[in-house]
């Protein structure tokens, strides 16, 4: 796809723009990292071999994307920073993922609902990102879009099965929908960096897609015989580095080796 | 069927095996052949899925993104092996549910090696190098085994296993080229995994109850002791390259035989673990049972949903 507009060739020579781009890349890729990590916890513990394999696949796709995004950041920083420094050596407040992706694997219903809420967003996002003014982002979006479509099909199909399956599965998955719904709105929040990138044509305007997102999700919930939760307040904070209490433990586990054996090659 | 007819079928069956032709699921086969294959193939499938657990233990803690992705992919391959082995076994007239039940009740076995814990990252390297190495030695001959579905599954399994083994060795190589602490981690892993890996190749020939019949059916081409010797001969030079010491003071090259001599395996430990009293037997089975039981409502939902969809289709048709 063609970019919406051409990037000014001097754009990235300005430190401030580069800083915003790096932040914007983190806001995107940290979601992939933390969700990939959460899914990795499930490997070998699935309800059956087929979904076990599929969930591992999604985790692999997300972590593959993480690597490409962090490698791009490392390239922009041009100061010996590696993808692993970015993944493993930041402090909790420096991670910019949304709260949704750090929510725990309470049961298979929560795993599927968390995934579906993210997948619908991610597919719309990557679809729009294919028109980014930034060439690297365009190609990353192009690479990720097919995977994202598969992820959405997987989680959407399971959501239908669980919602319209047995009484027990219906109740369980409705509970997951009710509990996770409050984390969806944050996906569409903009930040100083995402705004700057939007103005430059690097980032899509996700706020414009918010309505479409809810339309799509609500339609699937209806097909799955599930109720759309009515909530007064949504949760937010992840994009500003204010995470849930789960986050510290995710990082403690994920960073363990890099923190215990600094400056080692693996 | 008359006795003469059965005898005739038996003769045809034996002739096929002798001619290296494959036995397919629809072919007549002696009951003992069917049972032995269900036992071995299901045991093999169980080993793949129980084997996901010790390595899965390090997915969330892998030291780099590259290693995390490779480990996830490896454990996923094992799930895939489990899947095609269960399918091969199902062709012999046993359901996957029944096989799981036999695993959970302790009736069916899986490879004892997975009853040891993975304590450090180096264990992930050692498992790939040694455990997958021993598994390949066990499994390569099975690509030519007499039962068609098993032989075909094994061709795929072996290809992936040899990739896993290289990957494991490469982890060890990185550690051995690393800091002093990393080298110690690698040596410690070798110290802990060496003897259990030798045990993986099974009891000595004198104590092996199934060897003779299995050789006849080409479920086995070499005896346990021959395979073990092959493993030792192949692995010692690899340890030398890593600069690691194999934890066996009696290990030495024998000019005369052209093989390494090695010390006596602790068979008491072997039987202790086989009988269910290894360090992780209880935990591994618990994890499998939990995954299966906690997933019951999910599987039931999928079945119920599929039934509803079918009903809707047939109503609208």
Image (tube, rainbow, N blue to C red):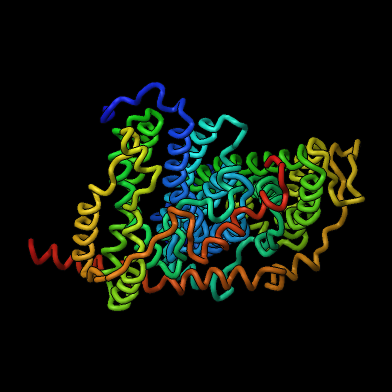
Q: Residue at x 92, y 50 (%)?
A: B249
State whether residue B273 is above or below residue B84: below
User: For this rendering, which residue is in front, B181 or B209?
Assistant: B181
Label total for image: 0
Query: Residue B301 vs residue B128: left or right?
Result: left
Q: Residue at x 48, y 43 (%)?
A: A66
Residue B315 spot, x, y in % from top left: 9, 66
Residue B141 showing in the rendered view: no
Query: Residue B212 vs residue B205: left or right?
Result: left
Q: Residue at x 44, y 27 (%)?
A: A12
From this viewpoint, which residue is outermost toward the left? B317
User: For this rendering, which residue is in front, B130 or A207?
Assistant: A207
Residue B120 spot, x, y in % from top left: 71, 55
Q: Quadrant of the C terminus of chain A?
A: top right
Residue A32 showing in the rendered view: yes
User: For this rendering, which residue is in front, B255 or A64?
Assistant: A64
Query: Residue B90 vs residue A162: left or right?
Result: right
Residue B133 spot, x, y in % from top left: 68, 45
Question: Image quadrant of residue A115?
Answer: bottom left
Q: Quadrant of the N terminus of chain A?
A: top left
State whether residue A79 is above or below residue B33: above
Residue A110 spot, x, y in % from top left: 39, 66
User: For this rendering, which residue is in front, B11 or B153?
Assistant: B153
Q: Residue at x 54, y 45 (%)?
A: B69
Question: Image quadrant of residue A25?
Answer: top left
């Amino acid at each position: 796809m063609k970019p919406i507009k051409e990037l000014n060739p001097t754009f990235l020579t300005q430190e401030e723009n580069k800083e915003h781009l790096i932040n914007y890349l983190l806001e995107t890729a940290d979601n992939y990292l933390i969700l990939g990590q959460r899914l990795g916890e499930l490997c070998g513990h699935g309800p059956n071999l087929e979904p076990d394999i599929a969930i591992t696949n999604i985790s692999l796709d997300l972590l593959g994307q993480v690597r490409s995004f962090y490698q791009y950041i490392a390239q922009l920083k041009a100061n010996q920073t590696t993808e692993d420094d970015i993944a493993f050596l930041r402090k909790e407040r420096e991670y910019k993922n949304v709260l949704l992706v750090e929510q725990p694997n309470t049961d298979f219903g929560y795993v599927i609902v968390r995934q579906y809420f993210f997948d619908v967003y991610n597919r719309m996002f990557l679809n729009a990102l294919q028109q980014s003014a930034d060439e690297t982002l365009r190609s990353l979006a192009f690479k990720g879009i097919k995977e994202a479509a598969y992820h959405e099909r997987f989680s959407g199909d399971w959501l239908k099965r669980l919602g319209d399956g047995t009484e027990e599965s219906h109740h369980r998955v409705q509970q997951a929908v009710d509990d996770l719904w409050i984390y969806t709105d944050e996906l569409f929040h903009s930040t100083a960096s995402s705004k700057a990138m939007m103005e430059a044509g690097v980032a899509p305007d996700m706020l414009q897609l918010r309505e479409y997102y809810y339309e799509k999700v609500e339609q699937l919930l209806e097909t799955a015989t599930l109720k759309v939760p009515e909530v007064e307040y949504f949760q937010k904070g992840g994009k500003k580095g204010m995470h849930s209490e789960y986050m510290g433990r995710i990082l403690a586990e994920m960073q363990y080796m890099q923190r215990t054996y600094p400056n080692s090659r693996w | 069927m008359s006795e003469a007819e059965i005898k005739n079928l038996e003769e045809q069956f034996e002739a096929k095996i002798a001619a290296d032709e494959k036995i397919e699921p629809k072919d007549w086969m002696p009951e003992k052949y069917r049972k032995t294959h269900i036992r071995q193939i299901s045991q093999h499938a169980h080993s793949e899925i129980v084997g996901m657990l010790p390595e899965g233990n390090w997915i969330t803690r892998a030291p780099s993104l590259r290693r995390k992705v490779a480990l996830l992919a490896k454990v996923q391959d094992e799930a895939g092996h489990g899947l095609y082995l269960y399918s091969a076994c199902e062709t012999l007239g046993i359901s996957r549910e029944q096989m799981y039940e036999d695993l959970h009740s302790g009736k069916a076995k899986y490879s004892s090696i997975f009853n040891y814990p993975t304590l450090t990252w180096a264990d992930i390297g050692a498992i790939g190098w040694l455990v997958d190495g021993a598994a390949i030695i066990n499994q390569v001959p099975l690509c030519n085994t007499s039962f068609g579905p098993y032989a075909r599954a094994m061709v795929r399994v072996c290809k992936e296993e040899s990739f896993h083994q290289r990957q494991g060795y490469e982890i060890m190589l990185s550690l051995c080229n690393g800091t002093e602490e990393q080298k110690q981690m690698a040596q410690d892993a070798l110290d802990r995994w060496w003897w259990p890996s030798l045990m993986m190749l099974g009891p000595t020939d004198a104590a092996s109850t199934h060897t003779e019949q299995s050789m006849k059916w080409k479920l086995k081409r070499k005896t346990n002791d021959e395979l073990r010797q092959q493993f030792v001969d192949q692995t010692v030079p690899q340890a030398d390259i890593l600069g690691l010491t194999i934890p066996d003071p009696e290990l030495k090259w024998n000019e005369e035989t052209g093989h390494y001599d090695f010390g006596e395996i602790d068979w008491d430990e072997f039987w202790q673990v086989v009988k269910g009293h290894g360090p992780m037997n209880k935990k591994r089975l618990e994890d499998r049972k939990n995954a299966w039981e906690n997933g019951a409502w999910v599987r039931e939902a999928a079945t119920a949903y599929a039934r509803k969809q079918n009903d809707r289709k047939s109503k609208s048709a």
